[in-house]
Amino acid sequence: MPLDAGGRRLDQVLAELLPQHSRNRLQTWIREGRVQLDGKEVTEPKRKLLGGEFLAVQVVHDEKLAAETPEDIPFPVIYEDEAIIVIDKPAGLVVHPGSGNWSGTLLNALLHHAPQLAQVPRAGIVHRLDKDTSGLMVVAKTLEAQTDLIRQLQARTVKREYRALLVGYLNRNGTVDAPIGRHPTQRTKMAVLQHNGREARTHYTVLEHFERSTLVQCRLETGRTHQIRVHMAALGFPLVGDGVYNRGKTGGVKFHRQALHAYRLGLIHPISREPMQWDAPLPEDMAVLLRQLRSEWEERKALRRQRQEEAWAAEWGDDEWDEDEAEEVEGAEDEAYDDAEMDPDFDDESDVPDDSEDA
């Protein structure tokens, strides 16, 4: 201990010598007997010092302390000014520290990127994305900006749109208006709860069909935990790759995470009050998956068309192939396929109308 510590309290001097630990934490360690002065255990935080004593502190490892530690973790910054940071979160990055993930999070990365965020609650984070969901998030750099963004979220004026790949052939646009709450028996999951869930509303629009999957746009009107994943599963079209809410359906598509990307974010700037909007392209893993599905679906349709032409030639001989009649035949088959998907007993692994051995 420094000589000028004489007459001062042990916990006060310790807090100055070990600023990386809070005074409250140091007081706890003293009471637990983890501090020695000149080789003797001392358990009274108010103990007055003489100055010049030899001090030994047994530091207790607490993994939760890592939650407050800046870490040099790169993340894409789409936009930044004195009030906000807009990032394109990569899949696999946990947003906020929690059980099993006390370090290596976006919060740790933000504290390294902008050290002043240590003075803002939750390092400026105002909303989250699931670990395996990619896409746009906004972070506040000041307490005033954070308060304003939270109010915008509460007023539902923040625009959040997603791209999601669903298992199954969804043939309509619509809205899922179903309250969401913690699953009554599986506490790590959320569920649609009609009686004690919180209001939740998701608007969805079909963008593209593949053989047994559908790309949709989802627009959030509310922001509940796992909202899109829960609502799409409740609709009967769970997300491809969702290991929590997809009960074994694959539609022939395999993906290492839930196929969900927050591609558009719009808000009112907390300082300028100007409306702002950003788009983030699909990450490479989802882009590759969609290109593959698109190619396979085109090959499938080309094969079906070839067989229709061969069947026509076999029945009508040299009569000319009629393009209009071909479209009618193809449309009728698509309609039969849609009807099969809407059947509650439809098994997406075995009951797809099949006209080839390798379908």
Image: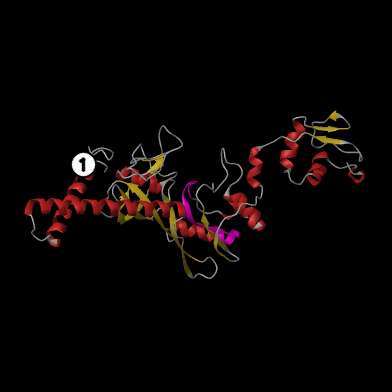
- Note whether 327 is above or below 22 in the view shown: below
**Residue at (82%, 31%) from the top-left corner?**
42
Q: Quadrant of residue 41?
A: top right
Q: Which residue is mark 1?
A: 343
> Dot 1: within a 10 Å radius of its alpha carbon, few (fewer than 14), some, or many (20 or more) residues?
few
Q: How many numbered marks are there?
A: 1
Q: Quadrant of the N terminus?
A: top right
Q: Quadrant of residue 101?
A: top right
Residue 323: % across, % down: 15, 61
**Residue at (34%, 43%) from the top-left corner?**
233
**Residue at (65%, 54%) from the top-left corner?**
112
- Note whether 283 is above or below 188 in the view shown: below
Q: Quadrant of the C terminus?
A: top left
Q: Quadrant of residue 174?
A: bottom left
Q: Amino acid at mark 1?
A: Asp
The one nearer the camera, 312 or 1, is 312
The one nearer the camera, 281 or 354, is 354
Determine if residue 302 is in view. Answer: yes
Q: Secondary structure at mark 1?
A: loop
Q: As drawn, is 55 to the left or to the right of 61?
A: right
Q: Indicate whether residue 347 is drawn in magenta.
A: no
Residue 312: % across, % down: 11, 53
Q: As drawn, is 313 to the left or to the right of 87?
A: left
The one nearer the camera, 118 or 156, is 118
Q: Which residues are magenta?
A: 129-145
Q: As drawn, is 25 to the left or to the right of 289?
A: right
**Color encoding of the figure:** secondary structure
